[in-house]
Amino acid sequence: MSFLAENIRYLRTQLNKSQQTVASSLLITRGRYAKYEDGASEPPLEILVRISRFFHVSIDLLLSVDLRKVPLNEIIQLPDNRIVFPIKVNEHGNNCIEIIPHKAQMGYLSSYSDPEYIENLSTLSIPFLRNGKFRAFPTEGDSMPPHQNGSFIIAQYVENLNDLKCGRTYIWVTRNEGITYKRLKAVEENALLLCADNPIYAPYSIELQELIEVWEYSCSIATEEFEQGILSPDSAQLMFLMEELKNDVQQIKKKLL
């Protein structure tokens, strides 16, 4: 089912534009444009591209998402307007953080742009997480101690890849691997080098074109009690912590200069 007719009618009224104004911008007649809004006919690809550029909304969104359900004045837009993130708050003004449950991880990859899917997720609010869009993702495996299997990483959406910082941890949503939590080791020409904090796992690269979303670590929630000794660092972990401390000191020095 395409939402095109409803979406372009809704967007035009939101902009307070007449059908003639939009049609003139698209270089077509008003009657032809009216048929698109009525659903009597569908625009060819060339006109669809013009419509997308006029409203500054991607073709994917125009066709597959009911924009009437999205608060357009309270959204973060991803690159190329692929999807939109409504920023919802509770009665106390705190952000509503959507929780991606373990059983819904695979569904997230196919439904992350569906407002109805996001609206049906459970939410939580943390008072000190206010500015930005946050989401809670489950972790699996032992690659990122001390976060145990079953913990949740609450992370903030990264709007611009230029804001990524080597040494920081992120939730990476990719077409091939799905959802993974790893540390950014290096930025390559057309890829990113990621590494686990557990030294038994080797670093690996992901191509930029495979990225769907990136979320920067903000805090975590442990759902199970830590086992005794789990936080006892071995030599490899100590070396990693020392390197991280050195990087932090260098960043502080740069800010003071």
Image: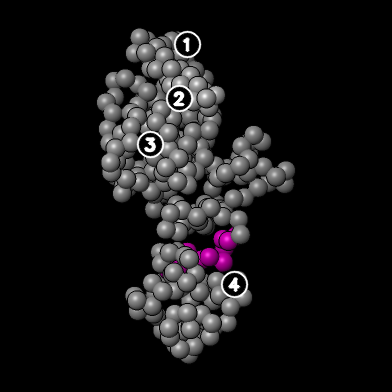
Give the residue type that dot 2 points to.
His
Q: Gap between marks 2 and 3, in whole Å?
A: 13 Å
Q: Which mark is residue 228?
A: 1
Give the residue type that dot 1 points to.
Gln
Local packing at callout 1 (Cα closer than 10 Å; few below 14, some 14-19, many 20+) is few
Give the residue type that dot 3 points to.
Thr
Q: Is disc 2 placed on a helix, strand or loop?
A: loop
Q: Residue at x 43, y 85 (%)?
A: 28
Q: In this view, does 40 lie above or below 50?
A: below
Q: In this view, does 227 lie to the left or right of 14?
A: left
Q: Is disc 1 placed on a helix, strand or loop?
A: loop
Instruction: Name the residue carrying label 4.
Output: 15
In the rendered image, the quadrant that contains the N terminus is: bottom left
Q: Where is residue 19 in the image (x, y as percent from the top left)?
A: 54, 83
Give the residue type that dot 4 points to.
Leu
Give the quadrant of residue 192: top left
Q: Which residue is drawn at 55% across and 24% down?
A: 256
